[in-house]
Amino acid sequence: MKNNLHVLLGATVADAAARPLHWVYDQKKLLTYIKGKKDFTFLKKNKSPFYHIKTGKVSGYNDVGQVMFRTLVEGHENIEERFKINVIKNFGSGSAYWKNFKLRAKYRKVKDWRGIIKGPWIHQNIVETIQNIKTKRKLTGGKKVNESDGYCAALPYFLYGYNFNSLKKIISIVTVSKISLKYALAKFHLIDLALKGAKDPINEFIKKFKKNTYFKNIVEDINKVKKLKNNPHSQTVKKLGMACSYPGTFNSSIHSIINSTSYSDAILRTIKAGGCNCSRVNFVGAYFSALKGFSSIPKSWIKKTDQARKILDQK
């Protein structure tokens, strides 16, 4: 596909596949949801305890990437400013995301509320980004959390061939967290190695950056995860981090990657571990589609993904 967009497709399909089981942190309960199923992607019944959207749609993580993708399809002039405008349109006032954000604030006042929001769930980074754009702050990205929104937003931009220095600006539109920036760049380097034909991008990354001070802790993280390779994935994810934040979401993704041989194997493994599996599959799916190519993504999964056609149309 043009501009390596099969990698975006791989991330998008993986996100939609995992979405009905997003944020299920009780691993035992998750196993009851998928009991007897070899393929537990695209569950017809939502099992997320936080929000409910139609099966086939993507989470807020991937959706910010779709906003960047649409921005790039529109053209390549003034990308940063047009992306900010499109973020407001997609997530801001009047959108289902923003309406549900206001509803969540109302529900928080209700003691012991445990209901499920009907519709999409906006992430903290995006809330801050919208507020900062509206108040015309120079730095618009969120700073309260260390999560994957910056990586997801920048993935299409990276695939269109923009360099690593300009990537930093795009990531910073939605997060100014130094931790998030570092782990996002590490993900892009791994995907880049896969696209360039490295047989083992993980080890190539270690070799390339073992003396690099910026990525020192990430190289150390990967080496620690490699020592846990033979441990059961779900148990390891529980230890490394099931939630959305770095470094847990990155390290848990690496554990899935080093224990998987194919795109579908990796996505199923990642979903089954629960927690914020959507943040993890956005990286794992991109990585394996970069490594194994377009044909590695199951056609039946592509057909079930609402956003897939728009990406395929850019061939």
Image (tube, rainbow, N blue to C red):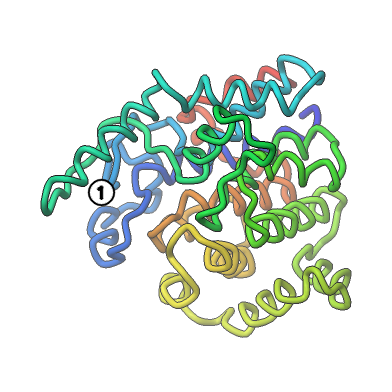
- Pick the quarter of the image with the N terminus: top right
Residue drawn at point x = 51 percent, y = 56 percent: 145
Residue 295 shows in this picture:
no
Of residues 243 and 174, the one drawn nearer to the viewer in this rendering: 174
Q: Furthest residue to the top?
A: 74
Examine the image and state in which quarter residue 13 appears: top right
Q: Furthest residue to the left?
A: 111
Amino acid bearing label 1? Pro
Q: Mark 1 points at which residue?
A: 49
Residue drawn at point x = 72 percent, y = 18 percent: 73
Rendering coords of residue 216 (x, y %): 77, 75
- Pick the quarter of the image with the C terminus: top right
Residue drawn at point x = 51 percent, y = 61 percent: 245
The relative height of residue 41 versus residue 69 in the rendered view (above or below) is below
Of residues 167 and 234, the one drawn nearer to the viewer in this rendering: 167
Please give left or right for residue 205 compared with residue 137 in the image: right
Numbered disc 1: secondary structure: loop
Examine the image and state in which quarter residue 19 appears: top left
Q: Furthest residue to the bottom?
A: 227
Rendering coords of residue 262 (x, y %): 62, 55
Residue 230 shows in this picture:
yes
The relative height of residue 212 versus residue 5 in the rendered view (above or below) is below
Please give left or right for residue 3 compared with residue 280 in the image: right
Specify few, some or many for label 1: CA neighbours under 10 Å numbering under 14, 14-19, or 20 or more.
some
Rendering coords of residue 71 (x, y %): 68, 22
